[in-house]
Image: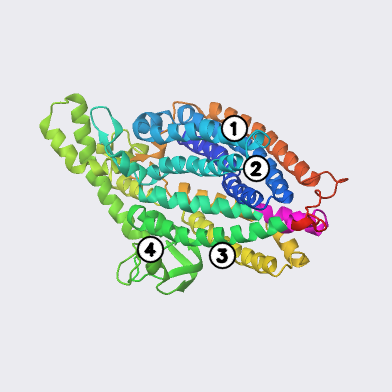
Amino acid sequence: MVDMDVVDLSRWQFALTAMYHFLFVPLTLGLAFMLAIMESVYVMTGRQVWRDMTKFWGALFGVNFVLGVSTGITMEFQFGMNWSYYSHYVGDVFGAPLAIEGLMAFFLEATLVGLFFFGWDRMSKLGHLAATWLMALGTNLSALWILIANGWMQNPVGSEFNPETMRMEVTDFAAVLFNPVAQAKFVHTVSAGYVTGALFVLAVSAFFLLSRRYTGFAKRSMTVASAFGLAGALSVVVLGDESGYALTDNQKMKLAALEAMWETHEAPAPLTLIGFPNEETRETENAIDVPWVLGLIATRSFDQEVQGILPLVAIAETRVENGLGAYDALERLRANPDDVEARGQFELSKRDLGYALLLTRYVEDPREATPEQISQAAWDTVPDVSMMFWSFRIMAGLGFYFILLFGIAFVLSSLRKHETRWFLRLALLSLPLPWIAAELGWILAEVGRQPWIIEGVLPTFLGVSSLNAEQIILTMVGFTVLYGALAIVEISLMVHLIRKGPYPEDEGRPAPEPRPGGLEPVPAE
């Protein structure tokens, strides 16, 4: 039987480290490409202010990058520390993209970051620009591989359980790489990072303009951020829709839970704009529905159904019962690997083995489970509906807010009305919102997968290491203290660099830039 205290503490510890790490990832993704854009303008125009912009925002990028890499190391160690059986069970599949991500982050990406910071006076302009663009691409490729690994956990394609080794093994690595869930998650995640980077630049630029410091510098930064952010915000919504469409075939329960849709509606299903899910009565109270919208988003059709939670629980119960045949055959194969009849029985029902394993939470031998325990295991496949419902609506609402915010910023920048003070205050107050949206997106992805650590294959409670609750609490306290100290250091460095500005206060602005043809110089600000 499983010690659920150990399971819950292990989940909380991983959530703590993952969500802390994810504070740095979106900003790294967004700033990297903005640096490449700013340096491209510097190389094309030769204007010193664009070099200053690249170096100033690059310094903030560097602080964030260091914290992101260091906290990412902790996450990877946890797979062996807290989730050792999971690592054993799927290491042949999960290990490859995770190893490639490590190589990308610690060798390719870190090397290019070093060239960016130390190559300004050692490389040609074009050489340094190439290194900056490669750094931006490398940062995104690093994210690609970790999302391939995570996407496989959500949709375990290209792999198969081997009853001889008792492990998952790769059968088609190309299917793992081009997993539709992983690809949808990647483009949605990086576009969210672009919004984060753009809003960070916009908010800091607003701070400079409100305090009337470095106004020329801030106006140029605001212009870049508004255009880049608007493109990113539009992409988030479009690609988020694609990510939702991927759930229709691969994670139907997650889709039903985030919509709090208990029953299957007549096609096309309505979208619940707002409501109050009641998990005791199993209905959504005071719901305001928009007809057809969910059906069009989820199925791209007018005639396909979106299944509700209750019918999906019934399907899960059938799969639990069917999985008992695979479990029984597996036990017989462990006793006699040459049992042909058992191997045939296993092949017929192996797809549902993971559902039978849900019963091990309640009974040592799933074959001895009662009908009530089978029903309970089926209901375990329903994630926290209220958390899913509200997380999705807040995240989606913020997504549309970002489109509005960057749309206004783009118009004001185009009209050269950068110093519109009400908007600058709004931009500054909006600074935390991309991180809130990103963390809610991570909650949707991970809470929505429960009770599975690998969707339909391995329950989360079976993946933990042989630890006790006291050991996990001790390390969790250690992580909290360490990460709290790192957060203070990171925020202090960021605030110090922003207050210091792109150049010393007594200098005020970069040297004037001469006009072509020997005309009088034009100030850079």
Tell me the crowding category of disc 2: few under 14, some 14 to 19, or many 20 or more residues within 10 angstroms, Cα based: many
Does label 1 or label 4 sit earlier along the sequence? Answer: 1
Asked if one can make out residue 468 in the rendered structure from this viewpoint, the answer is yes
At 52% from the left and 37% from the top, the residue drawn is 14
User: Separation of disc 2 and disc 3 at Cα?
Assistant: 26 Å
Mark 4 residue crowding within 10 angstroms, few (<14) / some (14–19) / many (20+): many
Numbered label attached to residue 70: 1
User: Considering only order in the chain, which callout, 4 or 2, is on the residue closer to the N terminus?
Assistant: 2
Q: Earlier in the sequence, mark 2 or mark 3?
A: 2
Return the mark for residue 298: 4
Mark 2 or 1, closer to the camera? 2
Mark 4 and mark 3 in contact? Answer it, CB < 8 Å: no
| Helix, strand or loop under label 4 | helix
Q: In the image shown, does 278 or 509 lie closer to the viewer?
A: 509
Residue 218 figure quarter: bottom right
Region of the chain picked out in magenta, as a range? 200-219
Q: Nearer the viewer, mark 1 or mark 4?
A: 1
Residue 75's x, y, as percent? 52, 34
Residue at mark 2: 61
With 14 as the anchor, is 205 left or right in this view? right
Disc 2 element: helix
Question: In this orientation, which residue lies closer to the viewer: 498 or 476?
Answer: 498
Give, as a three-letter code, the residue at label 1: Ser
Residue picked out by circle 3: 400
Disc 2 to disc 4, how far (Cα)? 37 Å
* First along the sequence among labels 2 and 1: 2
Q: Please tell me how crowded label 1 is: few (under 14), some (14-19), or many (20+) other residues with Cα within 10 Å.
A: few
Identity, as a three-letter code, of the amino acid under mark 4: Ala
Residue 210 within the segment the image draws in magenta:
yes
Residue 205 is drawn in which quadrant?
A: bottom right
